[in-house]
Amino acid sequence: MHPKKIDLIAEQIGSLAGKMFTHSIPVSKPRTIFFRRGMMASLDSSGVELLRSVVDDLMSDPGLSKRLSKSDVNKKILDIITEMLQNDEIDKPQHYLEEFITEVYSNQSRQVVYVPLAGIEMSVTSLTLGKVTLKKISPKMMKKMVGNLDTLRPEFESNLMGNVCALVKVDAEPERARQRALKECYRSLDLIRYALPTFYPSCDVFIGVVGDLFFGIQPTLIVTEGGGFSLMSESKPTWRYFQLSRESVAEMRRIGVFQLSKILLKNMNECTKFENTLIQAVHWFAEGQTLISKENQFLNLMTCLETLLTPGNNVPISNSVAECAALILEKRFEERLNTKQLIRDLYNKRSRLSHGGSNDVTQDQLDALRDIARRLLLFSVRNIKKFHNRKQLHDWIERKKLS
C-alpha cells in the first residue's frame, strides 16, 4: 500500500478515535454501539460513515482484500481504535495501522474450503475445474479433517458426509476464504451446466451449492363449495442427479469443458478479450438452467447470444445476431435462411417479454433457443485460439459472407 494512502487512513483512524464515545451510562442520542476487547463504545452517524470510508479505502488494496473480508477489516479497525483508547495512545494511529498491515501481509494461513454441492453423484475419484476440485467426502476423509465427528453439528455432517463437495484452497482469513471459494465454485459449476444439455436435453437436472436449490413437495388443498375437499401434491422440481462418471468426463472433454477450465485458472487481465467474453456467455447459458420460469430461462439464453455476437457498430442487434448465428451454424443457404428467420422470431419474442407484452414461452421455443446457444458456445470453444476479441470473430464472419 502506498505510504501516502497509509498516512491518510491513519489520519482518519485518529479522527475516529476522537469520535468514539466510551460509556458506562445510557446513551442519550442515537449512536451505533460496539463491544470490542471487553469495552463498550459507540459512534454517531458521522463516525459510522467515516468508519465505512476507512474500511472501503483499505479494501481497495488488492493484497488486503484477497486476504480479508469487509467484515474482518471493520472489526480490526474497531479493535485498533479500542486498543488505542485502552492504552491511552490515541495519537499513534500510524503505528497501529502499519502493525495491522504488516500482520496481514506476513500471515500466510491457507484454508481448504469444502463447499457441499447438490444434484451431483460421482463415480470418479475427483474432478478439477478451474481452481476447484470436486470430490466425494468419505467418513475417513471427514475424520481426518475434523478429528472427532461428534463435534460436528448434525446439519453439517449430513451435508458433508458422503456428499460431493467442491474443494478450494485459499490464502485468506476464514470468512474471506469462504467468499472467494464460493465465487470460484459458482464459476466451475457454470462449466458443468454448460455440459448438462449434452447429457440431458430435457434439462431436468439441477445442480448447485447446497442451500441454493429448493426441492420438496408442493401441497395443495382444494375445497369444493357445498362440501368436500381434495388434497393434491407435486414434487418440485422434478429432477435427477448429474452422474459424473468416466464416460461423462470424456464427453465434457469433447465439448471443451476443460479448455474453459484452463481459462478459469487465469487472472482476468491474463485472458484475451474473447476468453473473457466466452466465460461471460457460458455464465448466462448456465444461469438460465438454475431458473424455474421458462421466460427467465429464455431471456438468459438470448443474453448469451448477445454476449457472443453483438456487433460493435450501429447495425440493429437482432438482425446482426440472427445473421451471424446462421452463418456460423449452418452451411447451406436454405438452412441459413431458416435459422436466421427463427432467431429473428425468437428475438421478437424476447422484445415482447422485456417490454411487458406477451409472456408465454413455449417449450419448443425454449429448446430451439437453448440448442442455438449451445452450438454457438461449442463453436466458440473450439475456435478459442483463433479469435482474440469479438471484432476478430465479426471479421471472420464478414469474410465468410463474401466468400
Image (tube, rainbow, N blue to C red):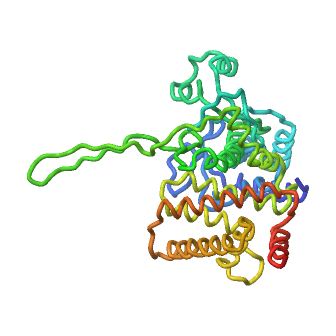
**In this orientation, which residue lies closer to the viewer: 337 or 215?**
337
**In this orientation, which residue lies closer to the viewer: 159 or 403?**
403
The residue lying at 74 percent from left, 48 percent from top is 255
Q: Is residue 319 above or below residue 383?
A: below
In the picture, which quadrant includes the C terminus?
bottom right
Residue 82 seen in the figure: no
**In this orientation, which residue lies closer to the viewer: 2 or 177?**
177
Residue 40 pos. (x, y %):
59, 42
Is residue 325 found left or right of 27 in the rendered image?
Answer: right
**In this orientation, which residue lies closer to the viewer: 326 or 318?**
326
The residue lying at 79 percent from left, 33 percent from top is 110
The residue lying at 81 percent from left, 58 percent from top is 275
Residue 313 pos. (x, y %):
77, 81
Residue 23 pos. (x, y %):
58, 45
The residue lying at 64 percent from left, 57 percent from top is 285
View extreme (left): residue: 226
View extreme (right): residue: 3
Is residue 242 found left or right of 53 in the rendered image?
Answer: left
Quarter of image, res 170: top right
Residue 156 pos. (x, y %):
56, 28
